[in-house]
Image (cartoon, grey):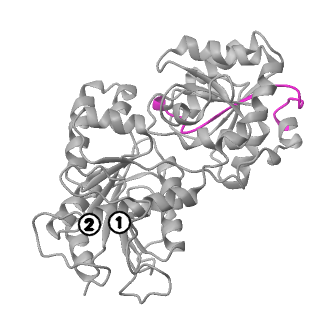
Amino acid sequence: MLDLQRHPVVDPERARPPDRTPSSGPRERWHVCVVTETFPPEINGVALTLAHLVGGLRARGYAVSIVRPRQGWMDPAGDLGDPALTLVPGLALPGYRGLRMGLPAGATLRARWRQRPPDVVYVATEGPLGWSAVRAARRLRLPVLGGFHTNFHVYARHYHAGWVERIIARYLRRFHNRTTGTVVPTADLRDQLRRVGFRNVSVLGRGVDGRLFTPARRSASLRRAWGVSDADPVALCVGRVAPEKNIRLAIAAYRAMQQVVRPCRLVIVGDGPSRGALERANPDLFFAGMLTGEPLATHFASADLFLFPSETETFGNVVLEALASGLVVVAYDYAAARAHVMPGRTGTLVPCGDARAFVEGAVALAAAPERFHRMRQHVRDSVAHLHWDRVVERFEGLLADVSRVPTQAGSIRTGGGDRR
């Protein structure tokens, strides 16, 4: 439940917003506005999570509107004609094709929200657009739930800008403490943020689509294209090919694996600013590029070992996708891996930042095929309970909680779902 320190707390498993069923009239349905700087068709963990949350709420009868930056070439010029979608100006992020940072849009948001006030605003990203959304919501006395999806302050270390890490961390704390509450994907992250002064932090976990990500999609033809037989181990790394994802460590682990087992293969799925240099330096690796849907699921299922060397995650949805696909995982002991990988049973966890232990963990699995194959028998079952429906249900409860908290400053906020 939402950790509201100065207000009564409502059990999210029992509290539900009123008048939100599909059969309710249009003024009675609950209206949730999602403000985000990333959303499909962009491909990243935040966009994936938001797609499931928005789709789940709409399936339950909520009216969900979305505010996001125009996504460049992915959006046609002019208005898309969708009253539930507000597009605002954005700036392209250097090195990240298709990703844009939203510019402040306070005046636009206040005008939209006065015309059609949301019952709750969910601000999923903390850029200039998100900051202006929190300010606008506070002025209109609208409850705001914030999402802490990305460790932006930690990213600074990987772009030779470590000096700004503390500045970004202070900004993030101030941002989230201006919201009614904040959600994070794991209990560990909740506890970390509480220790550094974040207030009202609650856990909203993640799910995985077990119908899409399944060992049944294993493809012999794809493995032949990789140049391996069914018995040869294939290591997989999926994610943005960028410094903060630490892909170089996955490559180092693979090189060490080659010393104990041949043939084997490393497949890297994803794109990003580091891809060109890594591909030129490692011509024997298979770079599959950006994949989604069934092609991505087939790549997961056709591999054997998942290498996840990132040190900057708030969660890491790909860990769940790997487990659902039957892959044994080697990862640092934090975020999704700590929450869902069982050491010695479904994978290997090593202390965060210990690159040598990461490499040794990968080599140990590659050198013990019988143990490795025993572990694979348990992998998929370990995440079979992680349904997105349950995550959406939890999200409903958190939205209900923040809607009941008195808001501060600005114009008077009407109650219930009917905002005239």
Mark 1 is surrounded, within 10 Å at the Cα level, by few (under 14), some (14 to 19) or many (20 or more) other residues, namely many
The residue at the point 44 percent across, 32 percent down is 312
- Front one among 26 and 133: 26
Residue 117's place in the image compared with 389, above or below, is below
Which x, y percent locates residue 259? 75, 9
Residue 289 is left or right of residue 229, and the answer is: left
Rendered residue at 57%/61% (across/down): 389
For the point 41% across and 34% down, the residue is 188
The CA distance from mark 2 to mark 1 is 7 Å
Element at label 1: helix
* Amino acid on which disc 1 is placed: Ala
Which quarter of the picture shows residue 38? bottom left
Q: What is the x, y in percent for residue 73?
A: 49, 62
Q: Could you classify mark 2 by the number of other residues whose Cα lies within 10 Å: few (under 14), some (14-19), or many (20 or more)?
A: some
Quick check: 236 left or right of 386?
A: right
Q: Name the residue under label 1.
A: 400
Res 404 label: 2
Quadrant in the rendering for residue 251: top right
Q: Is mark 2 on a helix, strand or loop?
A: loop
One can see residue 75 in this view: yes
Q: Which residue is depicted at the point 71% across and 42% down?
A: 381
Q: Do the residues labelled 2 and 1 touch (CB within 8 Å)?
A: yes
Residue 270 or residue 357, whichever sits in front = 357
Q: Can residue 35 be seen in this view?
A: no
Magenta stretch contains residue 100: no
Q: Is residue 246 above or below residue 290?
A: above
Q: Is residue 247 above or below residue 104?
A: above
Percent position (x, y) of residue 183? 36, 50
Q: Magenta part of the protein: which range?
A: 225-244
